[in-house]
Amino acid sequence: MIDLQNIYIDYPLDPVDGASLKQSLLNALDRNKGRRKNYFRALDNISLKIQGGERVGLIGLNGAGKSTLLRVMSRIFQPTSGFARIDGRVSPLLDMATGFELHHTGVENIRTRLMFLGESQKSIEGKIDEIAKFSELGDFLHQTARTYSTGMFMRLAFATSTAIRPDILIADEIIGTGDAQFSDKAEARIAKLLSEGKITIISSHSMGIIRKFCNRVIWLHHGKIISDGPTEVVINEYENRAPKMIK
């Protein structure tokens, strides 16, 4: 289960050296300083619950706060204020390069990512062959990651992150990418996770992907939830209203 109540995320706008003498003098001379926000509000009073078995799509224009919300759900970001409860094992697919070291081989990176996801050493060694087979990277698994294309990163990240059978799978613009053959395999694995009653949260600009996998959609705009409901209802509302909201 995911339970978020009154979540705010604020990013500071002041530079790291804001306490320098020069900055202090400028602040003192700026009479409007106290009336200006020195932060950017990425999430604005977000409250939602997601139960086991739900398949949730996250949609919105660029800058809507989707990636920030996914990072809260993944326990990567702590809210500035509010309550976040995430029950279950989370496997985030947020950035294909996260957890990868370019000077390490594919196999070494598999071990690192699985360790990051909480796997024991014994469990990690038992999963390497299956991940290698699913990723279809062959001898490239023994090459350094700096030789990998974006598609190869995607294969390795997806194969590794779904090998642990998470309770909650969170994907940001990764489903449906890559070559057609691997996309079909990835979609089949997602479908298997859904059949096991797992929570799946997918952020995508592709309404086709959202329609295919999700029975609930949350529409974000400027850090706020605009609509939350059945897939077709929210997508139709988004497609009708979103173009008019672009500024």
Image (cartoon, grey):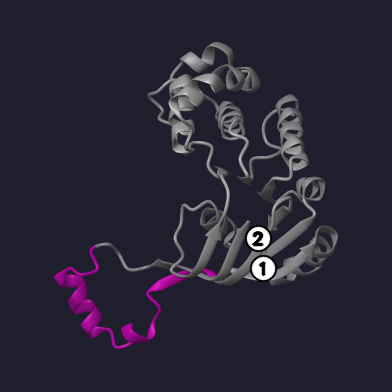
Residue 36 relative to residue 214: left or right: left
Pointer 2: what residue? 61
Image quarter for residue 236?
bottom right
Q: Earlier in the sequence, mark 2 or mark 1?
A: 2
Give the SS element for disc 2: loop
Image quarter for residue 57?
bottom right
Q: Measuring 38% from the left and 24% from the top, which residue is drawn there?
A: 103
Instruction: For marks 2 and 1, give the CA distance.
Output: 8 Å
Q: Are marks 2 and 1 in contact (CB under 8 Å)?
A: yes
Give the SS element for disc 1: loop
Counting from the top left corner in percent of width and height, residue 49 is at 65, 64
Residue 92 visible to an observer of this rendering: yes
Q: Measuring 30% from the left and 64% from the top, which residue is drawn there?
A: 15
Q: Nearer the viewer, residue 114 or 144?
A: 114
Q: Nearer the viewer, residue 23 or 154?
A: 154
* Above/below status of 61 relative to 94: below
Q: Amino acid at mark 2?
A: Leu
- Residue density around tag 1, few if under 14, some if 14–19, many if 20 or more, within 10 Å: few
Image quarter for residue 39?
bottom left
> Which quadrant does the N terminus fall into?
bottom right
* Above/below status of 106 relative to 4: above
Residue 28 is inside the magenta segment? yes
Q: Measuring 73% from the left and 50% from the top, which residue is drawn there?
A: 53
* Above/below status of 151 relative to 216: above
Pointer 1: what residue? 246
**What segment carries the magenta color?**
17-43
Q: Nearer the viewer, residue 182 or 92?
A: 92
Residue 120 is inside the magenta segment? no
> Which quadrant does the C terminus fall into?
bottom right
* Above/below status of 100 relative to 28: above
